[in-house]
Structure formats: structure tokens, C-alpha cells
């Protein structure tokens, strides 16, 4: 149900999506969908939650075993853009969803996805930069997630850009600052 709902939401946009169409495509009655999800927004929230969980799991797995902070960041970014590729139309829908159109639960779910990525980056940064204060780690994670989100808006409109190329755009803009912090901590310890 959710795979078909994600496709319909992507094709039509949230406001133009009808539960009748989703039910027809799934091959169930509309009341059955309401039984599972409660409302159209409930179905959208379930779709966002599923995508959010997959994003969190894929990005967390991608950095395991990285030999350096630079490699970990690059692998995480490439995975993020591959994920965006796998959900290109849905991703575009989520990023352009107007808060006035969807309810608070959907907006909260989107923000939860952002916060999960921020927490993942904070954990990664603190592992490589243990002497960096928490506020600086939080700021770096917010900057990185914001940059990824905005670049993904551009990325989904350019089929000729690969996930690796998109990741390199972010690396060029963020790695120098993070590398400088790593070098500062290394120099401080010596």
C-alpha cells in the first residue's frame, strides 16, 4: 500500500492525491486504507516514516568501516544522494510540501527525519573530533544537513548529475572547515 501511495503522492502531489485512486491501484477498498492509516495525512506520515527509517539505516551503515573522517563523510554523502535517486520523485515532493497543505503530523515527521540525520552527523563528528564542543558539533551537523537538503532540491532536477558528483559538491564546500577543526585538535594534542 505504501509503495503505491508514495508513487501516487509523487505523481499528483499531496493535495491532488485521492484515496480512491490509491485504493484502486492497490486493489483494496478505500475503507481498508482508512482502517490502516486513519486519513490521507496518516498515509502520508506512514510513507514519510518508512522513507525516513530507510534513510537513517542506509546512511548509518554506509560509514561503518571508514578509514578516515573524510572517507566517512564522503561515503555518507554519496549514500544520501543515492537514496535521493532511489526516491527521486518522492524526495522532491517531501521537500516542496507546503506546511499549509499537509497537517502538523506530516511536517513533524519531515523534521524528525532532519533531526535524525543531524544526530547521526553529531555522533560521527564527535567520534573524529572528541575535543570539539557540543555547540560546534551541532552547528556543523545543522549546516551539513541544510546543505544536503538544499542541494538535493537542485539534484533531483538534474538527471545528468551522479550521486558521487553531488557528494563532491558538498565535500568541496564543507570538508575544508571540518578538516581545519581536525587539524587544530591534532596540533593542540602535540
Image: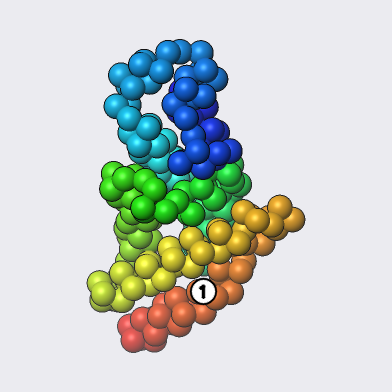
Image quadrant where residue 29 sits: top left
| Nearest to the observer: residue 94 or residue 165 | 94
Determine whether 154 is above or below 159 in the image. Answer: below
147 w.r.t. 108: above or below: below
Q: With 170 as the anchor, is 190 left or right in this view?
A: left
Is 25 in front, or is 178? 25
- Looking at the image, which residue is at 35% across and 37% down? 41
Give the residue at the far right of this rendering: 160
- Res. 189 image quadrant: bottom left
> Which quadrant of the figure contains the C terminus?
bottom left
Q: Give how far across and how far down residue 46 sits, in percent.
A: 36, 34
Which residue position holds label 1? 175
Asked which colour scheme the image uses, the reply is rainbow
Q: Position of residue 124 (x, y in %)?
A: 37, 61
**Which residue: 35% across, 16% down?**
31
List x then y, in percent, for residue 168: 62, 66
Is 15 or 70 nearer to us in this picture?
15
Around disc 1, counting alpha carbons within 10 Å, would you say few (fewer than 14), some (14 to 19), or many (20 or more)? some
Q: Work out whether residue 59 can be spotted.
A: no
In this rendering, does residue 189 appear at all? yes
SS under mark 1: helix
Residue 117's quadrant in the figure? bottom left
In this view, the residue in front, 54 or 179, is 54
Up-down relation of residue 119 to residue 12 (above or below): below
Question: x and y percent of residue 127 in the render?
Answer: 34, 63
- The residue lying at 35 percent from left, 60 percent from top is 118
User: Does 4 sit above or below residue 27?
Assistant: below
Amino acid at each position: 500500500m505504501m509503495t503505491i501511495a508514495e508513487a501516487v503522492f509523487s505523481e499528483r502531489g499531496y493535495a491532488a492525491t485521492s484515496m480512491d485512486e490509491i485504493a484502486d491501484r492497490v486493489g483494496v477498498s478505500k475503507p481498508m486504507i482508512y482502517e490502516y492509516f486513519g486519513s490521507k495525512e496518516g498515509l502520508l506520515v506512514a510513507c514519510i516514516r518508512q522513507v525516513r527509517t530507510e534513510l537513517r539505516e542506509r546512511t548509518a551503515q554506509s560509514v561503518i568501516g571508514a578509514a578516515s573522517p573524510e572517507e566517512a563523510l564522503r561515503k555518507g554523502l554519496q549514500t544520501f544522494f543515492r537514496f535521493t535517486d532511489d526516491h527521486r520523485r518522492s524526495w522532491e515532493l517531501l521537500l516542496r510540501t507546503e506546511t499549509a497543505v499537509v497537517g502538523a503530523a506530516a511536517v513533524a515527521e519531515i523534521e524528525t527525519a532532519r533531526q535524525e540525520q543531524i544526530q547521526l552527523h553529531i555522533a560521527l563528528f564527535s567520534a573524529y573530533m572528541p575535543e570539539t564542543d557540543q555547540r560546534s558539533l551541532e552547528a556543523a551537523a545543522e549546516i551539513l544537513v541544510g546543505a544536503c537538503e538544499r542541494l538535493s532540491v537542485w539534484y533531483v532536477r538534474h538527471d545528468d548529475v551522479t550521486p558521487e558528483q553531488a557528494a563532491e559538491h558538498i565535500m568541496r564546500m564543507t570538508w575544508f572547515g571540518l578538516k581545519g577543526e581536525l587539524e587544530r585538535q591534532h596540533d593542540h594534542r602535540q
